[in-house]
Structure formats: structure tokens, C-alpha cells
Amino acid sequence: MRKVEMPREPVELCKILKFAGLVTTGGEAKLLIGDGQVRVNGEIETRRRRKMLSGDTIEFRGEQLKLQRV
């Protein structure tokens, strides 16, 4: 599981996917989230602008991220 440090919270889910390098654009992130390809805290998430907080986990394409505030 890879840790992703956030300087502030909350942060939108689509922005985290882009920041972490899992997608190339925010538009791509929004499409994949809307298509149900992303899990947040173990559940499928389709809200593109879901507000993410420290301690949340994201699963996408076999990779797991844990958010951590710095």
C-alpha cells in the first residue's frame, strides 16, 4: 500500500488520482470514477468529487493508496 501525503483536506477524489499519477488527466479520472472502477474504503465510488480525508484508502487498477495529511 502506497501512502499519499495531502497538504490539506478535504481533497476531491479525481484530483488525488491525478496527483498520484494513476491517470494522466482529471477528465480521465472523472470518467473512470463514474464508470465504477475506483473503490474508496472498500466500496465502489462513483461520485467524482467525493471529498477525501486523511485515513481514507483508494483502490484502483490493482494499486492501493492510503491518504495521510502532512
Image (cartoon, rainbow, N blue to C red):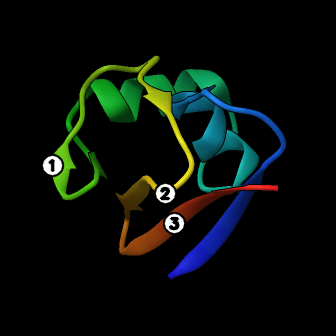
- The quadrant of the picture occupied by the C terminus is bottom right
Residue at 67% in and 31% down: 9
User: Which residue is situated farthest in the left direction here?
Assistant: 43
Residue 59, image x, y percentages: 36, 61
Secondary structure of residue under mark 1: strand
Tag 3 residue: 65
Dot in front, 1 or 2:
2
Category of crowding for the residue at label 1, using alpha-carbon neighbours closer than 10 angstroms: few (below 14), some (14–19), many (at least 20): few
What type is the residue that disc 3 sits on?
Leu
Dot in front, 2 or 3:
2
Q: Tell me whether the residue at label 2 lies in contact with that at label 3, contact meaning CB atoms closer than 8 angstroms.
A: no
Instruction: Find residue 43 and name its label.
Output: 1
Task: Determine which quarter of the picture holds residue 41.
Answer: bottom left
Tag 2 residue: 55
Instruction: Find residue 66 and name its label.
Output: none
Quote the CA–CA distance across marks 3 and 1: 14 Å
Q: Earlier in the sequence, mark 1 or mark 2?
A: 1
Residue at 78% in and 34% down: 8
Q: Earlier in the sequence, mark 2 or mark 3?
A: 2
Left or right: where 11 falls relative to 13: right
Quote the CA–CA distance across marks 2 and 3: 10 Å
Q: Earlier in the sequence, mark 3 or mark 1?
A: 1
* Vertical relation: 32 (above or below) 30: below
* Vertical relation: 60 (above or below) 39: below
Residue at 39% in and 25% down: 31
Secondary structure of residue under mark 3: strand
Camera-nearest residue between 27 and 2? 2
Residue 40, image x, y percentages: 31, 48
Task: Determine which quarter of the picture holds residue 26.
Answer: top right
Camera-nearest residue between 54 and 49? 54
Category of crowding for the residue at label 2, using alpha-carbon neighbours closer than 10 angstroms: few (below 14), some (14–19), many (at least 20): few
